[in-house]
């Protein structure tokens, strides 16, 4: 092989699925810069990142965490709220608490030997050992003490929340560090079924001096409800940043940079075509890029090859798009499919098409907006947030 030949064995040119970091992570300089500022100097209490599904929010958070890896005094604590299992508030607080301990321990800031998971599960001997240990922060002991007496009443849970969040602030203060609590898929807290949980979190975190809060979520309407209105819990507390798909220039930059790794120059027409097909969604750029790479026979990337790759992902799409549909009720699905097939996002014509009343259709549309599948353009007019899902539905159901 000559130096300039194509190395198709480069397997990690693209990564499809899962958050990406390091050499797979492209751009997002602005928001990463802001997060790094937040870590260095606590200029404001924190951030709220929101944006449609698959725009790269989790990747930004993970890349930020990776970049703080060598900073001894920055302690990021990451939790995906949607993944709390079993899904209830008490488990959520336990996770915040134990991840906090893990994070401080990993950076050598506290020397707690006990197995926190075991104690939370009810290990008495572990608990006794921690309580006796004079080196252990009072905040840790307080959480554990409360935990064993909790009766699952709302008042107890409220106290548990306070103690869990207090542990981060106290440990940060005691160790001279900056804790950063990152709660991904934050809108899921609504599903814990507690009233005013976001307000409770606000009232605790607004007093933090040593810890910052970052929340993220893909339910655009819910994130707006949490941050935008004057009556919203995080109004004026968190800096709100919208994460969007890449613009044409960034999208082209990413594709060019990837193929350059195997000495392939992608021409402008191809870059434009790739952007038009993916709408700059990082996830689809990775996926289409990967299929183009797979189908590459020579050194040329052209229209035909790109279209072949696109056809492939539309075929393979079953796995991911069908999973998207599974999260919907049958009524919501009908409406979504109706919008895709008719190519019209007018509530009135959808209602006719799916044969349901305007009121019922309106309710479905509202839920689809809440779940992040549709975006409202103006009164009565909606569009898909994910144009590839739309295309796939159209091909599949027309
Ligand atoms: N900065 C980036 N550079 C390159 N690819 C990216 C970037 N961000 C995201 N991606 C791609 O997009 C995919 C989705 O990213 P990620 O999971 O971070 O999005 P998300 O907004 O958190 O999605 P969801 O709303 O589903 O949680 C990743 O698997 C990756 O392929
Ligand atoms: Mg995510």
Image: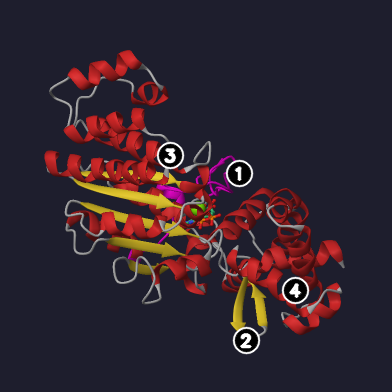
Closest to the observer: 174 or 291? 174
- Magenta part of the protein: which range? 1-30
Of tags 2 and 4, the one toward the viewer is 4
* Lower position in the chain sequence, tag 2 or tag 1: 1
Residue at the spot 72% in from the left edge and 52% down from the top edge: 326
Q: Residue furthest bottom?
A: 379
Q: Secondary structure at mark 1?
A: loop
Of tags 3 and 4, the one toward the viewer is 3
Whether pointer 4 and pointer 1 mark residues with C-beta atoms closer than 8 Å, the reply is no
* Residue density around tag 1, few if under 14, some if 14–19, many if 20 or more, within 10 Å: few
Closest to the observer: 301 or 234? 234
Residue labelled with disc 4 = 361
Residue labelled with disc 3 = 90
Residue 245 percent across, percent down from the top left: 52, 67
> In the image, 128: left or right of 85?
left
Residue labelled with disc 2 = 379
């Amino acid at each position: 092989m000559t130096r300039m030949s194509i190395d198709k064995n480069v397997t990690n040119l693209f990564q499809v699925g899962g958050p990406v970091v390091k050499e797979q992570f492209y751009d997002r300089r602005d928001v990463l810069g802001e997060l790094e500022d937040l870590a260095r100097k606590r200029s404001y209490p924190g951030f709220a990142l929101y944006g449609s599904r698959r725009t790269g929010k989790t990747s930004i958070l993970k890349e930020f965490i990776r970049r703080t890896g060598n900073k001894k005094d920055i302690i990021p604590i990451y939790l995906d709220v949607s993944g709390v299992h079993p899904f209830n508030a008490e488990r959520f607080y336990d996770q915040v608490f134990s991840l906090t301990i893990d994070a401080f321990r990993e950076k050598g800031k506290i020397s707690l030997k006990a197995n926190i998971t075991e104690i939370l599960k009810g290990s008495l001997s572990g608990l006794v050992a921690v309580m006796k240990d004079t080196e252990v922060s009072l905040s840790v002991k307080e959480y554990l003490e409360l935990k064993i007496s909790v009766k699952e009443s709302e008042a107890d849970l409220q106290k548990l929340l306070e103690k869990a969040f207090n542990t981060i602030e106290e440990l940060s203060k005691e160790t001279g560090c900056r804790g950063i609590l990152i709660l991904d898929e934050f809108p899921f807290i609504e599903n814990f079924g507690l009233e005013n949980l976001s307000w409770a979190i606000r009232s605790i975190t607004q007093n933090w001096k040593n810890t910052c809060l970052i929340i993220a979520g893909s339910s655009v309407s819910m994130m707006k409800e949490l941050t935008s209105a004057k009556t919203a819990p995080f109004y004026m507390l968190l800096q709100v940043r919208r994460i969007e798909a890449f613009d044409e220039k960034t999208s082209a930059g990413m594709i060019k940079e990837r193929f350059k790794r195997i000495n392939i120059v992608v021409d402008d027409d191809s870059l434009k075509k790739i952007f038009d097909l993916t709408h700059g969604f990082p996830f689809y750029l990775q996926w289409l890029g990967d299929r183009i790479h797979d189908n590459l026979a020579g050194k040329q990337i052209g229209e035909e090859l790109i279209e072949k790759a696109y056809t492939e992902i539309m075929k393979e799409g079953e796995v991911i798009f069908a999973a998207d549909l599974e999260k919907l009720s049958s009524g919501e699905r009908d409406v979504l499919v109706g919008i895709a097939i008719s190519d019209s996002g007018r509530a009135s014509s959808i209602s006719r098409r799916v044969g349901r009343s305007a009121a019922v259709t309106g309710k479905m549309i509202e839920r689809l907006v809440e779940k992040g599948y549709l975006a409202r353009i103006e009164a009565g007019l909606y569009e898909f947030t994910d144009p590839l899902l739309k295309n796939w539905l159209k091909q599949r159901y027309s």
